[in-house]
Amino acid sequence: MAPSVADLKTEESAAPTKADVKPKPSGLSYPFYYPYYDVDEKFPPTQLFEHTDVGARADPAKPNLLTPNAITRDISTYLGTEITGVQISQLSKEGLDELALFAAERKVLVFRDQDFKDLGPERQIEIARHFGPIQRHPTSGNVKGYPEFHVVYRDPEHDLFKEYRGRERASGIQWHSDVSYEKQPPGTTFFFILDQPGVGGDTLFLSQVEAYKRLSPEFQKRLEGLVAVHSAVKQAEFSQKRGHPVRREPVETEHPLVRQHPVTGEKALYVNQGFTRRIVGFKTEESECLLNFLFDHISKGADFHIRATYAPGTVVVWDNRVTAHSATVDFDNAIRRHAVRLTPQAEVPIPA
């Protein structure tokens, strides 16, 4: 059982405040989305719900998404497609269904030149809810009055990347699938780029489908049926230590090591260094040995990785069920990086 919030307090905890009320720095392109923290904000436990992936009803030809104006460029063979000539804000319900299917097939979609005048917070939330209930993050900065948003922000006064990964680490890379500790982790996910360095600040993505395919058939069979624990505890401990909120009791949830996508039927590894802690039924050394091999396998698989490059007005859509990703902290924190994520939850992971 995961510890309670009270158990996470340490002597090093910063004194909590009602809310983060620091003045917003100048120069923000979108000050509305500046991260907001309220230690008194609390969310109830997430509840199980019936989920049907909207991609299952999509037209495979995708006429409402890939219109004659759409220009696509595949970033690699296994994942990643860049799209211009499509405004997400203008997509019909049928177009959004096709977006879910395309994201499942290509794993990561990078939409360029999105007009945020037509893609304000209400429309962003409306679009995301088409794919499932939006996960409200238990610890991150959100937008005041809009707890659905997870804010990603870095500047000289606000550098959680370095603090969370550890100042003594030689690399900031940490592969993860967003909030995989949830009972129903996310599927189709949206990431809106607001302010971005001219160089750097990209995201690495990998295909967990191709990572699974690269394993031998005998090894694949050994992994199928195994279950691993995904934990929110470390994330909650970090937030508690900084005097930031823990809005929901941290959970630990068991998920299959290999899951199957409900629409494409593809099998994918479902492990990530950020949240996967141990394999159920294995002794400690056995679990560490197998998980470390899988972490090493996915992190070194450069031939099934991509590097998604960004600019203001980029919107990235990816399927968290079949991918993992990592920020790249390769820019000076004197340069602002600002983005927001909406994370609709999907089905309970289906074992392969």
Image (tube, helix red, strand yellow):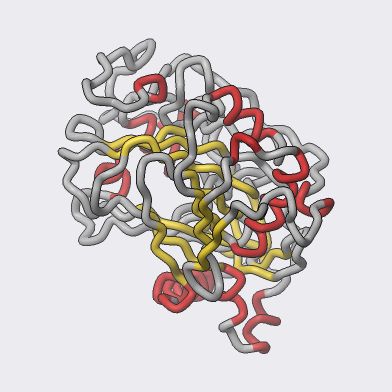
Identity of the residue drawn at 23% across and 54% down: 330
Q: Is residue 176 above or below residue 341?
A: below
The spot of residue 116 in percent (x, y) is: 47, 31
Horizontal arrangement in the rendering, residue 290 relative to residue 18 (left or right): right
Identity of the residue drawn at 71% across and 69% down: 266
Q: Nearer the viewer, residue 178 or 102?
A: 102
Horizontal arrangement in the rendering, residue 62 relative to residue 31 (left or right): right
Q: Nearer the viewer, residue 6 or 132?
A: 132
The spot of residue 247 in percent (x, y) is: 51, 25
Q: Nearer the viewer, residue 262 or 25?
A: 25
- The mark tally for this picture is 0
Quarter of the image containing the N terminus? top right
Using the rendered view, name the quadrant where residue 241 is placed.
Answer: top left
Horizontal arrangement in the rendering, residue 172 relative to residue 263 (left or right): left
Q: Nearer the viewer, residue 43 or 334?
A: 334
The spot of residue 176 in percent (x, y) is: 47, 55
Q: Is residue 39 above or below residue 272?
A: above
Q: Is residue 325 above or below residue 290?
A: above
Quarter of the image containing the C terminus? bottom right
The spot of residue 100 in percent (x, y) is: 69, 51
Camera sees residue 13: yes
Camera sees residue 285: no
Identity of the residue drawn at 42% across and 17% down: 38
